[in-house]
Amino acid sequence: MRENYHEPLVLDDLARSAMMSKFYFIRVFQRTTGVTPGRFLSAVRLHEAKSHLVHSSLNVAEISARVGYSSASTFSRRFTASVGLSPTQFRRSGRGLREGRSACLVRSIARDLTRTSRVSAGSITSSTKPRSAA
C-alpha cells in the first residue's frame, strides 16, 4: 500500500496478494496496524500530500491526483477534516516544515490516523461492489 498509494486499490486484490480471503485480510490487517486498510491508505495518501504541499510547487488538484484521489474536492475535504487546515492553508502555514522531511513515516501516519478517526476511508474498493462516488 505504501508503494502503490497513488493507484486505485481493490480490497480483493490486496487480500489475494496476501493469499487470504478479504474478510480475514481485514481482520489481520486491523489487528496488526490498529486500523482498517482503508484508513491506513487514507493516512498514507494524506502524509504524501503533506510532503508535496511543503516540498513542491504543484497545485492542490495536481497533488490530489498524484496521491490517488480522483476528485480534488474530496481530497480537500478529507485533508481539512484530518489536518484542521485546508491544503492551501497548510502550505502557507509552513507547518510541514517543522515536522521535517525525515520524520518517521510510521509515526507520521499514526498521528494522521489518530486525527482521521472521523474521516471516511472509502479509498479501497471491493471488486464485488460498485464503487461509490464518495
Image (cartoon, grey):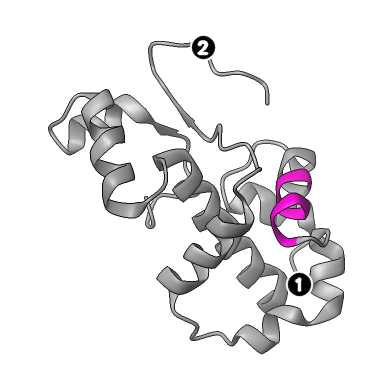
Q: SS for tag 2?
A: loop
Above/below status of 83 relative to 119: below
* Quarter of the rendering containing residue 14: top left
In the rendered structure, the answer to whether residue 30 lies left or right of residue 134 reads left
* Mark 2 Cα shell of 10 Å, populated few (<14), some (14-19), many (≥20): few
* Mark 1 Cα shell of 10 Å, populated few (<14), some (14-19), many (≥20): few
Disc 1 marks which residue?
A: 57
Q: Does the magenta segment cover residue 73?
A: no
Disc 2 marks which residue?
A: 130
Instruction: Identify which amino acid the numbered label 1 is placed on.
Output: Ser
x and y, in percent, of residue 33 in the image: 33, 53
Above/below status of 48 relative to 30: below
| Quadrant of image for the C terminus | top right
Q: Residue at x 78, y 44 (%)?
A: 77
Q: Does the magenta segment cover residue 81?
A: yes
Magenta segment range?
A: 77-83
The numbered disc on residue 44 is none
Give the spatial CA distance, label 2 vs label 1: 35 Å
